[in-house]
Amino acid sequence: MPTYEFLCPKCDYLFEELLIQSEEIKKYQESHPCPKCRTKSPRAASAVNFTFNVKTPGNSGVHDIDYPKNIDVVVGRSAEKKWQKYNVRKAARDKFRKEHGVTAVTEHNGKIMPTSSKKLAIRQKVLNMLLESKKAER
């Protein structure tokens, strides 16, 4: 919308007028009556307000419009595929646990099997060491 600034020569009042209709623009393009003293006030020099109407990315200020095929979309899709694979593996492991009555399972070369007692002992030892180091930090 065209906003014009005017400076009254009599009372030094700087004011803005929003001129919408083409008749108003033609009539008040050079001068406008001051709202305080009604003196004919010439148009003042003001800052320019414009935008580029170029159809290139990065001009609307809205990220999704300017960059529709950005890395976020690609990452989102790959993350979705990753979670699908994870959920399939988790379902297979849960099924194996239920069928064999075990809680600890290991996957080796795509095959699911119960975790050996030796591996469980190592896991427990590492867990205990971690807990002890956390206690020592406090």
Image: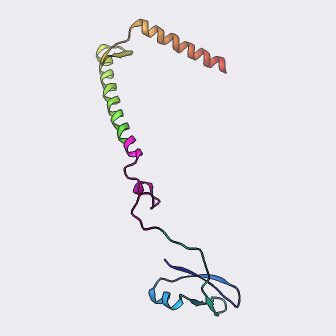
Residue 8: x, y in percent? 66, 88
- Asked if residue 58 lies left or right of residue 37, the reply is left
Q: Main secondary structure of the magenta part?
A: loop
- In this view, the residue farthest toward the right is 11
- Magenta region: 52-75
Q: Quadrant of residue 17?
A: bottom right
Along the viewing direction, whichever of 109 and 50 lies nearer the viewer: 50
Compared with residue 100, is residue 77 higher up or lower down, i.e. above or below? below
Q: Position of residue 100 (x, y in %)?
A: 30, 13
Q: Quadrant of the C terminus?
A: top right
Residue 134 in the figure: left or right of residue 63: right
In the image as oriented, which residue stretches furthest toward the bottom?
39
Coloration mode: rainbow
Q: Give the residue displayed 56% in from the left and 13% down from the top.
A: 129
> Which picture quadrant has residue 38?
bottom right
Residue at 33 percent across and 17 percent down: it is 97
The answer to whether 90 is drawn above or below residue 70 in the figure is: above
Percent of width and height locating residue 127: 52, 15
